[in-house]
Every structure is written in C-alpha cells, then in structure tokens.
Amino acid sequence: MFIGEYKHNLDSKGRLAVPAKFRAILKSGAVVTKGLDDCLFLYSKKEWEELAQKISSLPVNKANDRAFARLMLAGAMEVDFDKQGRIMLPEYLRKFGYLKKKVVIAGLYKRLEIWDENKWNKYKMGTEKKSGAIAEALGELGV
C-alpha cells in the first residue's frame, strides 16, 4: 500500500526518485499517466492493468466516458527504474502536471500522485479548510 507524503526534486532530465519503500511494490513494473487536479498518477503494473480494463470497458457512446478513457489511457506511459530508483517522466507528462523542480509524491493506497510542490500545498490547504464539510458528506455515505 502507498501512504504518506514525500518531497523530491525532479532533475534537469526529467528523472524523479521514487521513495525506496515503494520500489518493492513497483518492481514488477509501473505506469504513470495524466491524473486529475493537475497531478500525475503512478500505478503498479498490476493495479494499472485492473484499472485500464475497467476504463476500456466504459461505453463509447458517452462523451464523458470517452474523454476520461482518452485522458487516462492515451496519456499513460510505462516507466522503468534506473539504478538510483528514479523514473523518467516524459516531457508531455511533466508539462501536464506543471512539474518543474520541487515535487511531492503522495501515497493514496493503490496509487501514488506526483504533484508540483506549490500546487500540492495550495490544494492541500484548500482541502484542509473544507475538511469538516467533506467529512460530514462522507459520513452520510457511511465512510
């Protein structure tokens, strides 16, 4: 499982070190794709295959389903780890996520999110301010 928040630097070639504790989960392969809220999603190959199967099964006659499938599937790229535990983020994904130098990797149980540090801090502050209302709405759903 992926949990926690980690700060890393993206190097000039677009390489990003993934926390060592997550590399074992990702050793059989990983996929990075365009995420939501201006971040990237990083999945283990196994999780990605399960998710991609569900996404590819969405009906093609619904515009939102087609758009989501295009975002997630066409935006995806398999990534490998180098000897230092880094992955290469392609330029189109760095541009999508507004990634420059300072990056936050956030663990969300089945996936990692890769954020520009400034965007992450703004998002987190906004969400924390609304945490009571969010918790109340989730409580109504039994969470």
Image (cartoon, rainbow, N blue to C red):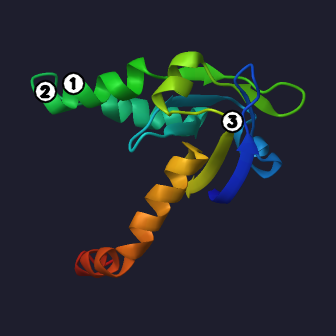
**SS at circle 1:** helix
Q: Name the residue that disc number 2 marks.
A: 63
- In space, the residues marked 2 and 1 are separated at their CA atoms by 5 Å
Q: Name the residue that disc number 1 marks.
A: 66
**SS at circle 3:** loop
Image point (70%, 38%), residue name: 26
Disc 3 residue crowd, few under 14, some 14–19, many 20+, Cα 10 Å: some
Q: Is residue 104 left or right of residue 38?
A: right
The three-letter amino acid code for the residue at tag 1 is Arg
Q: Position of residue 34 (x, y in %)?
A: 45, 31
Q: Residue furthest left?
A: 61
| Label annotation for residue 101 | 3
Q: Is residue 138 visible?
A: yes
The N terminus - image quarter = bottom right
Residue 39 against residue 86 in the figure, above or below: below
Check whether the beta carbons of the residues at disc 2 and disc 1 lie within 8 A of each other: yes
The mark nearer the N terminus, 2 or 3, is 2
Disc 1 residue crowd, few under 14, some 14–19, many 20+, Cα 10 Å: some
Q: Is residue 48 left or right of residue 10?
A: left
Q: Position of residue 85 (x, y in %)?
A: 83, 34
- In space, the residues marked 2 and 3 are separated at their CA atoms by 35 Å
Image point (64%, 24%), residue name: 89
- Which of the 4 quarters of the picture holds residue 90? top right
